[in-house]
């Protein structure tokens, strides 16, 4: 019974490592091979048990650390003149302060060439994803990140400035309120809209907080160029 339990624990742990490696290819550590080897009668060597014990004592990387590893090639600085950036996971999109439409930027100042096809990322978070794309397609497309948390918008703007990216821009905006007027004022075509991991708000009384509301979906459909994507 004890050996069966021990084997089950190790099998579960090896599956967890495989999942972490699958979804985070830049994860620095990898599962030691000794934890994945078993004899036919499920007897585990003492060295494997020791390795497993060491793994259990080491805390798993936090999600923010995994994200930083995935975008490590951006070489983003954390010595910004913004003080401590405490990121709130949830804000109330129905609050009065977030019900005011965002000011339309001067597109000539936001982008070097405002006639390029535009990608809009609704809920862009830290902005790393857009900066990663912008760095790889400097003359092909512009990237606009809309985020409802002002502190991380300021940080993303500072990062984009440090990277000297002239095809990415970030705005503090409630997309359900501001998306339509922003994209309608943009000189070029809207080619792509991404909405990554929106909060589903399962409870019926919270459905009104969802980012995917009919007016936003209609605005996306009405403004996408022929062949545009979501």
Image (cartoon, helix red, strand yellow):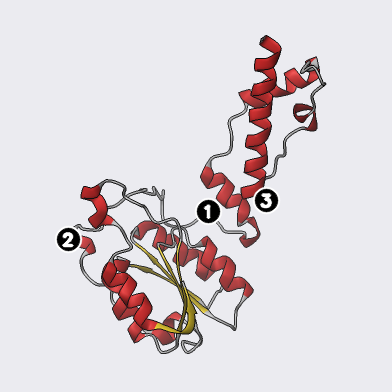
> Residues at badges 1 and 3 in contact (C-beta under 8 Å)?
no
**Mark 3 or mark 1, which is nearer the start of the sequence?**
3
**Mark 2 or mark 3, which is nearer the start of the sequence?**
3
Question: Mark 2 sits on what residue?
Answer: 96
Q: Secondary structure at mark 3?
A: loop
Using the image as rendered, state which of residue 5 and residue 106 is in the foreground.
5
Residue at the spot 58% in from the left edge and 66% down from the top edge: 132
Residue at the spot 53% in from the left edge and 61% down from the top edge: 128
Closer mark to the observer between disc 1 and disc 2 = 2
Task: Please identify the residue farthest to the left as the structure is shown.
Answer: 96
Closer mark to the observer between disc 3 and disc 2 = 3
Residue at the spot 37% in from the left edge and 52% down from the top edge: 199
Residue 78: mark in rendering? 1
Q: CA distance from mark 1 to mark 2?
A: 32 Å
Residue 108: mark in rendering? none
Position above or below: 137 against 116? above
Residue 25: mark in rendering? 3
Residue 165: x and y, percent?
55, 74
Q: CA distance from mark 3 to mark 2?
A: 41 Å
Q: Quadrant of residue 135?
A: bottom right
Relative horizontal placement of residue 151, taking residue 52 as reference (left or right): left
Residue 221: x and y, percent?
37, 78
């Amino acid at each position: 019974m004890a050996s069966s339990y021990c084997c089950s624990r190790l099998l579960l742990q090896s599956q967890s490592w495989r999942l972490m490696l699958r979804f985070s290819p830049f994860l620095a550590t990898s599962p030691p091979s000794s934890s994945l080897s078993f004899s036919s009668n499920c007897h585990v060597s003492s060295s494997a048990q020791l390795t497993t014990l060491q793994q259990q004592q080491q805390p798993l990387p936090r999600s923010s650390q995994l994200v930083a590893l995935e975008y490590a090639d951006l070489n983003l600085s954390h010595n910004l003149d913004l003080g401590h950036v405490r990121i709130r996971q949830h804000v109330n999109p129905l609050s009065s302060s977030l019900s005011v439409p965002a000011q339309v930027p001067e597109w000539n100042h936001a982008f070097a060439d405002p006639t390029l096809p535009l990608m809009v990322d609704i809920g862009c978070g830290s902005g790393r994803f857009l900066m990663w794309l912008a760095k790889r397609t400097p003359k092909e497309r512009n990237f606009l990140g809309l985020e409802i948390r002002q502190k991380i918008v300021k940080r993303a703007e500072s990062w984009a400035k440090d990277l000297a990216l002239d095809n990415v821009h970030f705005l503090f905006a409630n997309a359900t309120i501001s998306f339509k007027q922003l994209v309608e004022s943009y000189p070029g075509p809207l080619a792509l809209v991404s909405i990554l991991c929106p909060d589903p708000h399962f409870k019926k009384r919270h459905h009104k907080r969802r980012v995917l509301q009919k007016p936003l979906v209609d605005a996306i459909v009405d403004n996408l160029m022929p062949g545009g994507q979501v």
